[in-house]
Image: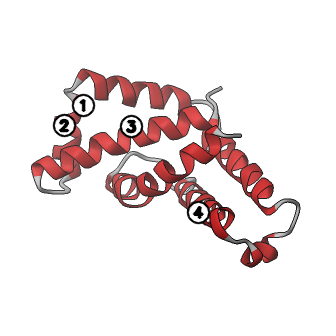
Amino acid sequence: MASAIDVIQGIIKLGTAVKSAASASGSKDWSTVLGSILGDSAVSKTVTDLYKQLKGSTPIDTALSAIRDKEAAVLKGAGVADASSLHGQDLLDYHSLADAELALATQKLVSALDASFLDWLVDDALPSLTTVLPLLMAL
């Protein structure tokens, strides 16, 4: 089974490729964007690898679990209600983790690679996950 970090890195690679292709084409016509990037062997491999990681397992649940573990570590045993007492880098880390958790939990509700998935990927997940990946890698 893929680790949370592997899944997040795969999502980031796919999101970056989709965002670049959308920027280059000047539109979010996702069928055109997907057609243009899937012809690229590196992007096709990323999509295939990510699909293999997601197929038959619950990698989003694994990623959510890792994020929640890191949130607990940042809270140092305090409850979520005590998050407002965090300061400095701990507060920023907790906020980034919470954003990533929300993005992944939301995606659990979406099961198909369609326009809404790609909108979510480029607009919501990519910014949150690129911020939280270094925090997860430090676990």
Q: Residue furthest right?
A: 77
* Mark 3 / mark 2, whichever is N-terminal: 3
Q: Is residue 30 left or right of residue 49?
A: left
x%, y% of residue 24? Answer: 13, 47
Seen from the viewer's position, the closer of residues 13 and 82 is 82
Give the label, 1 or 4, closer to the camera: 4
User: For residue 13, which numbered disc appears in the image?
Assistant: 3
* Mark 4 / mark 3, whichever is N-terminal: 3
Neighbourhood count class around disc 4 (C-alpha, 10 Å): few under 14, some 14–19, many 20 upward: some
Query: Which image quarter holds the C terminus?
Result: top right
Marks 4 & 2, CB-CB < 8 Å contact: no
Distance (Cα) linking label 3 and label 2: 17 Å
Marks 2 & 1, CB-CB < 8 Å contact: yes
Q: What residue did someone put label 4 on?
A: 102
Q: What residue did someone put label 1 on?
A: 38
Distance (Cα) linking label 1 and label 4: 28 Å
Q: What residue did someone put label 2 on?
A: 35
